[in-house]
Amino acid sequence: MKTLHWLLACSALVAAPASADYLDVEKDELTLGFIKLTDMAPLAVAYEMGFFEDEGLYVTLEAQANWKVLLDGVIDGQLDGAHMLAGQPLASTIGFGTEAHIITPFSMDLNGNGITVSNGIWEEMKRHVPLMDDGRPQHPISASALAPVVEDYRDQGIPFNMGMVFPVSTHNYELRYWLAAGGLEPGYYSPDDISGQIGADVLLSVTPPPQMPATMEAGTIFGYCVGEPWNQQAVFKGIGVPVITDYELWKNNPEKVFGISAQFAEENPNTTLALTKALIRAAMWLDENENANRGEAVEILSRSEYVGADEEVIAASMTGTFEYEKGDVREVPDFNVFFRYNATYPFYSDAIWYLTQMRRWGQISEPKTDEWFIETAQDVYRPDIYLEAAQLLVDDGLADAADFPWDSDGFKEATPAEDIIDGIPYDGRQPNAYLESLPIGLKGDQIIVGNEVQG
């Protein structure tokens, strides 16, 4: 029987195992962390649908205050694992920020983010956005439409501030990618200046996801990049307009991961497999029968112990549509993907993209060889664990073998130019050639010295 526990200021849920045949797990009482975002769904579903129970696991789910608190919890052992930004295990393992070896055996989703601007900024942008025959803005919207607005603010001496959720978040890299693709400098990091604002046209800073709408409404930031439901929340509150989703920015891009310490995985191999099995089943449930379960998932996520937003707000993006300007609802069936397209497989090429963005903007301050990028990805992303868990599910009759990439070498096919907003393809096998192809950002032997790019 499931029991509800409230732990101090955090909401927590505990699932107890039902009688079943399961792995001989080394640790059966686990605490897993998450941030209140739609893409924590696999954890909530694995709990609510009894998938953790089926693996003999007593699982407590605890909402965390922010991404740093969450990461620290995994590192110090207060959390056994967590819903993580994909950049967190990579950054920790290479020593950017807190150093610790974190791995991921499971990718949680594809897509799911958006970039929103305030109503005032949108009104200024709109005059630079082409219209369709019906008078609505033509999507995807390039940051080139924002460039004259930023220039006008600069001429007035007003800093142009935007928010993202964490320095190694997908949101930081997606917002930077969008800005750079439109000809705007999003700024650099250096070992001496970790603001990320060196040489920036647009000043990016950290704002926790649930606080994004209020921070923009207060005028502290003019826009932000965040996961759902906090873009749709701006629409429902009438304070902002999402101008682009990450699906339009880079079709089927990787998003969150499930992170655990390498030590936990080494000491608890069966527990790690059991967790991965439960999460795969949750992802399958979320996408099965053409998203038939999304309505139930929305109700689950709306509960205060999970995301705690109105069902209508969560459903606005999670059930196959996305609302831009109020009333401008468009079909985006793959805005949230949890299992299709091998979404749960931890591809090395996904990890390498994050590492290239860290290098592009100076978080990795020195040049690295292609081999370094690949070896680092292999040290953090663990498809071997994932496939072992998948095989156990197939053996249990709970999954179809045809749904898993058994013969993958860990690399996706190169993303074609037409699937990325700037028309520049991405091939994870050639990270340095990819960096060279990007017009804005560090490449080759370039480094940041003081406030300048040198090399």
Image (cartoon, grey):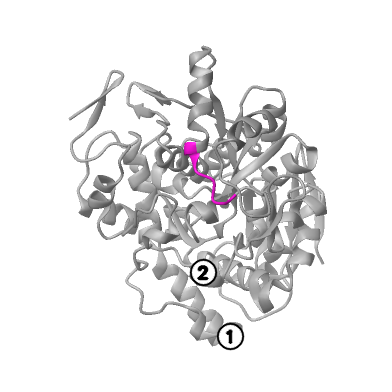
Question: Callout 2: 10 Å neighbours few (<14), some, many (20+)?
Answer: many
Give above or below for 107 relative to 89: below
Tag 1: amino acid: Asp
Q: Is residue 94 magenta?
A: no
Tell me the tag on residue 322: none
Question: Callout 1: 10 Å neighbours few (<14), some, many (20+)?
Answer: few
Tag 2: amino acid: Leu
Q: Which residues are magenta?
A: 138-144
Q: Nearer the viewer, residue 287 or 179?
A: 179
User: Quarter holding the C terminus?
Assistant: top left
- Overall secondary structure of the magenta section: loop
Q: Is residue 6 visible?
A: yes
Going 50% across and 74% down the picture, which residue do you hit?
389
Give above or below for 66 relative to 262: above
What x and y, as percent, mark residue 367?
A: 22, 39
Q: Which residue is mark 1?
A: 396
User: Quarter holding the N terminus?
Assistant: bottom right
Going 28% across and 56% down the picture, which residue do you hit?
374
Q: Nearer the viewer, residue 127 or 163?
A: 127
Give above or below for 153 relative to 374: above
Q: Nearer the viewer, residue 18 or 119?
A: 119
Q: Is residue 228 left or right of residue 144?
A: right
Q: Secondary structure at mark 2?
A: helix
What x and y, as percent, mark residue 429?
A: 27, 60
Q: Which residue is mark 2?
A: 273
The alpha-carbon separation of the residues under discs 2 and 1 comes to 14 Å
Q: Secondary structure at mark 1?
A: loop
